[in-house]
Image: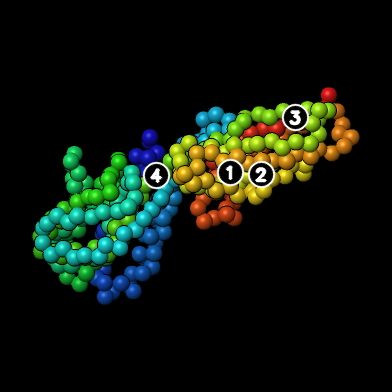
Amino acid sequence: MEQEKEFYEKLKEVNARIDSLSSPVVEQAKVSSSHSGYLFLFVIVAIMFSALLYIGVETTGFVTFSESVSSSEQESFSVFSSKEVQISTDLDNINSMMLSGTVYGEGKAAVFLVTPEKNYLAYYFEGDATRGVNFTNMCYDTCHLENLGQDNTLLFDLEGMRVDIDKITYLYSRLIDFDLEPRTIEIDYNKEPAKVIDIRLTNRELADYTVLLYIDGPLSSSFSWQGSLIHMTPEESEKTVPITVKLPSNLPKGEYTHKITARYVPPGTYDFVGESPVAESFVVVVNN
């Protein structure tokens, strides 16, 4: 997509601007405000990337999207000469790898991610770093990767330089795919003024996530269920939520439509406010 291309170009530009900072480690306090500005810019671009991961609703009630998940491996090590270093992570289907650390010396340093197809540049520095130059979340060509495995190789190409790696950050897109069934339920008020309806929340990709379940409609106070936060685990392909409906007496003639919504809640943010993917079912109370 064109938006993704623009994002990756922007991310490379941010990396280049961060890399251009040549202030020594001992003078880091003097440029802290500048570093904060670059960090803020990187966070904004990362948010743009997360927004691109949402795929949207294909049909009413059925939602497929992906969620960006990060993991930082505190793999501290130093490399003094050109060599290969083995790295690993517990994450699957990695889409991005970023390096943080410090470069020392005067000359040239390049770090590549080695794959069977090609070597991807993760970090590059050329110049004077005798007193040390920090770098954070660098990923020139490793900002976006396809199906990177858990075990990988970094190739250090060094000329008069030493590189200290403090942290390796990985990102991957976890697919979340959920649905509410059945799509539509009809209640005949004259036959069943009270009943229990079963709503099934499906977990098509066997992911770990939480949804907020709620009901909107003219008779929503007549609907009750146990708990509004529904948590799905990778072991659960579906979960049934029984909803008790006790309709009021002397209900005027007509049809009353209610919408049952399962709204995805980002991890650790149960007070989340804003747009997020939803799946929907509808209950129609008919009094003819």
Q: CA distance from mark 4 to mark 1?
A: 19 Å
Is 185 drawn above or below residue 88 in the view shown? Answer: above
**Outermost residue to the right:** 250
Could you tell whether 233 is left or right of 220 in the image?
Answer: left
Asked whether the beta carbons under mark 4 and mark 2 sit within 8 Å of each other, the answer is no
- Sort mark 1 into few (<14), some (14-19) or many (20+) by Cα contacts within 10 Å: many
Check disc 4 and report the residue beneath it.
173
Q: Mark 2 vs mark 3: give the one in front.
A: 3
Residue type for callout 3? Ile
Visible residue check, residue 18: no
The front one of 93 and 46 is 93
The front one of 161 and 215 is 215
Residue occupying the point 28% across, 49% down = 150
Mark number displayed over residue 214: 2
Residue type for callout 2? Tyr
Q: CA distance from mark 4 to mark 3?
A: 40 Å
Q: Mark 4 vs mark 3: give the one in front.
A: 3
Residue occupying the point 52% across, 46% down = 232
Asked whether the beta carbons under mark 2 and mark 1 sit within 8 Å of each other, the answer is yes
Q: Earlier in the sequence, mark 4 or mark 1?
A: 4
Q: Earlier in the sequence, mark 2 or mark 1?
A: 2
Check disc 3 and report the residue beneath it.
187
Q: CA distance from mark 4 to mark 2?
A: 27 Å
